[in-house]
Each structure stands twice: as structure tokens, then as C-alpha cells.
Amino acid sequence: MKTLYIDCGMGAAGDMLTAALLELLPDPEGFTEELNRLGIPEVTFQPETSFKCGIKGTHMRVMVNGEEEDEHMHEHSHDHVHMHDHEHEHHDHDHEHTHDHDHGHEHHHDHDHEHEHDHEHEHSHDDDHGHHHHHHTGMHAIEHLVNDHLQVSDKVKKDILAVYGLIAEAESKVHGVPVSEIHFHEVGTMDALADVTAVCLLMDRIHPDQVIASPVHVGSGTVRCAHGILPVPAPATELILQGIPVYSRQEIRGELCTPTGAALLKHFVTSFGEMPVMKVQASGYGMGTKDFPVANCVRALLGETGSGTDGVVELCFNVDDMTGEEIGYAFTKLMEAGARDVFTVPVQMKKNRPATLINVVCSEKDREKILQVIFTHTTTIGAREVRKTRYVLDRKIETVETAFGTFRRKHSSGYGVEKYKYEFDDLAAAAEKEGCSVRQILEKLKQYE
């Protein structure tokens, strides 16, 4: 199974995800040229080599009108909600905050506030008049731009709008306004649209069977706003990350996960957890610009696993007052109810009584049904539950025509290995027909593997 694993140990942002996924491709230069022909107004993608803690990776520069957004002067609007990828939250005047990705800069305004950002902002300004002005784009305009102007497939368009929808919904809840009233600043809209589009297009090109990500490091500290001090993660990011495992480390101060990074993860990741057992075929490092004791990057690994991992439940209990026949009957009923496996272990219980430990493995969705069978067909009055992760190979049944007849064979593959196993009933029938042992039949069948 083709598996993409994303390491979010330093959070996630659209530009960093773009760079990490770009490095997985055999021709990143050609794909960059494709990105620059997408039709995003005034946007140019410029990947550049970057080193963090001695590790080589890629930093993706998104140029809007020939400039990165940190080159613009910024003014926050009281009247409009705005969204961008490289800024972690939307604030009013008179505040100071620190961000932990991409672009570090400091600037001053008449509003008496100071920023240190590692992501880009979405504001336009009028240098000739010495003051700032804003252009706003609502969700309807975003949909029009995506559907009518981007040179991407319908599937990629659907993914782009789904990601924007997650962010707009979160901003709607944070600011208490309908989604239809959420506005995005013009310059930042192009920048964020570039990152979202690039990641969606890369995911479509890589086309993994499953996407697994680590728990997301959100950073630590606070953000001071005119209305008070907000904790990290900021409100919009926190809403998007609900249902996703996250954590914080005090040694990394600032916000590591952007709203857009969170939304991209939520849209594409099928499960969160530790890296699975996999045969890695390619790796990519998407770099931020700020330096930390830990490499400031998103790492992506592409490789082969089995059918992936699934959560299973092991229900176990002891019985000392059931006969072998009764236990055998309970086995049958448990397997009929959907148990994946049932096995027993001889044990000694209290008062030195010989007993049987019965273990039942089932999927989480079948737990209640299996418990009902356990309490109906065994004498136990309680069962213990242990949740486990199961790693499995892809499996399919093949039919093999041989000189000795037709045989069913299970073909298992994944993790860089392949295995074959013939159905025993077919082997036994052939052995009976040929007047030989099952092992001799297996020897004769090796020529068909």
C-alpha cells in the first residue's frame, strides 16, 4: 500500500508542506514550472535550498507581484476577517507576537504595535500615498477564481475549496459572523491560494493510498491582542485542529501550526499516530526560515506498507467452570459474530484452580456485539479490554491451474515482501487423489510460484 507519512514535530504550514511534498517527486523542477502556469494571479513559486540543523531541504518562496509578503507593510483591519497561511492568527491593533515559521521581520506603524513573524501576511499598501488600503475577497469570489481560472482538475478544485471551507468555518465561529461574510485580503488571498493549490495538486500527483501524520506540535506561549492575551494555538487554528492529536513543548515558543496548515492536514490525513512500519522510497524536507534547537521543518516520507494499520480490541476473561465442549461452542458463536480470532491459554486462578484464559480479537465496531456473545455463551461475569494496533499485509485469493488440479492460493504482499499459501483443503484433496502426502504436493507446486 502506497503510504505518505507526514512528521509534524514542528507544526505545519502550507509553504512547508508544499516544499516537503515537492521533494518527493522525481522532477521537482518540472512540477514547479507547472505550478507557475496554474493561473493564480501575480503569483510565482520559487523553491530554494535551505539548511536547518545541518539538514538540507527546500524552502518554498511564494512571490506575489514579485515580492514575498513579508516585504509588505502591514495594517490589521478591525472591520474584516482575513485569512492567510503564513500568519497564525488575526489580531487587532496594539499587539506583539512571535511566530515560529518561515519569515522573520519587525515593523512599526502608527498603531503602536510590533510583530515578529515567521510566515507571510496578506496586506496591500500604497507606497505613493504613504498609507495602506485593503481589497477584500469573499468565499464567493474564491470559488469563482478556483472554478473558472485555475488550470487544475475538478478533483483538485474540490479539494482546494474544501480546505478553504474548513478555514472559513473556523474563522466564522471565532469572529461570530456568517461564513458568507468572511473576507480575505487580496494579496494574502493569492499567497494562501497558492499554498493550498500547490499542496492539493501535489497530493493528487503523489496519489497515496493512505496518509498518516504524527500528532501536531502547536508550539507554546501566548499572543497579545488589543482585547487580551490569547494562548497558543490561536482560536481559529484550535478549532480546525479539534479531533486531531496535538501537543505543546515549552522549549519552543510561538505558534508552529497555521490555520491553513491545520486545514490541509485535516482534509488529507486519514489517521494520526506513530510512523508505521514501511519501506521508505522517498523523503522530503520542507523548511521554515527561523532557527530553533530542533530542525524547523515538515518531513514527508513516501513508501510501501501493508494494508496499513487498524485498531483492534482484545477482550479477555478467565473461566474455571466451563467444559471443553462449552468453550468450543462459544468459539463458534464468537467467530460467527465477527471475531477476527479466538484463542485460549491454560492458567491457574485463585485458590490454585486450573482455568482457561479466553482471548477474543475483534474490531472496535464489533465490540458490543462480541461482548453480548461472551456474556451469553460463557460463564464469565466480566471481560478486560486492551486496544491494540494491528499491522497487516494486503491479501487476495488467487486460483492456480496445475497438472494436479485447481488450487486456491492466498497471496499476501506489503512491507517489501510477498508470501503465498495454498488452501489446505485443496492440498488435502490432491494428496488423497495422488496417494501421497500434503508435503509432497507442496513440493510439486513450487514450479507454479
Image (cartoon, helix red, strand yellow):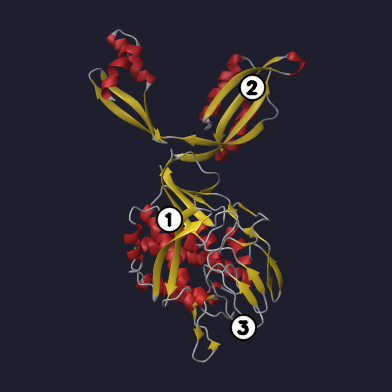
Label 2 crowd bin: few (<14), some (14–19), many (20+), radius 10 Å: some
- Residue 330 vs residue 437: left or right? right
User: In this view, which residue lies farthest toward the right?
Assistant: 351
Label 1 crowd bin: few (<14), some (14–19), many (20+), radius 10 Å: many
Where is residue 161 drawn, in percent x and y? 45, 66
Q: Are marks 2 and 1 in contact (CB under 8 Å)?
A: no
Position of 149 relative to 110 (above/below): above
Where is residue 385 drawn, in percent x and y? 64, 34
Quadrant of residue 226 within the rendered picture: bottom right
Q: CA distance from mark 2 to mark 3?
A: 72 Å
The amino acid beneath tag 3 is His
Quadrant of residue 41 within the rendered picture: bottom left
Disc 3 secondary structure class: loop
Q: Nearer the viewer, residue 416 or 343?
A: 416
Q: Nearer the viewer, mark 1 or mark 3?
A: 3
Q: CA distance from mark 1 to mark 3?
A: 37 Å
Where is residue 49 drawn, in percent x and y? 43, 60
Position of 343 relative to 260 (above/below): above
Tell me what residue is drawn at x 26 percent, y 19 percent: 405
Tell me what residue is drawn at x 62 percent, y 80 percent: 108
Position of 377 relative to 394 (above/below): above
Question: Which comes sooner in the sequence, label 2 or label 1?
Answer: 1
Q: What residue is pinned by disc 3? A: 109
User: In this view, which residue lies farthest toward the front?
Assistant: 54
Q: Count every numbered label the image shows and give the total.
A: 3
Q: What residue is pinned by disc 2? A: 357
Q: What residue is pinned by disc 1? A: 21
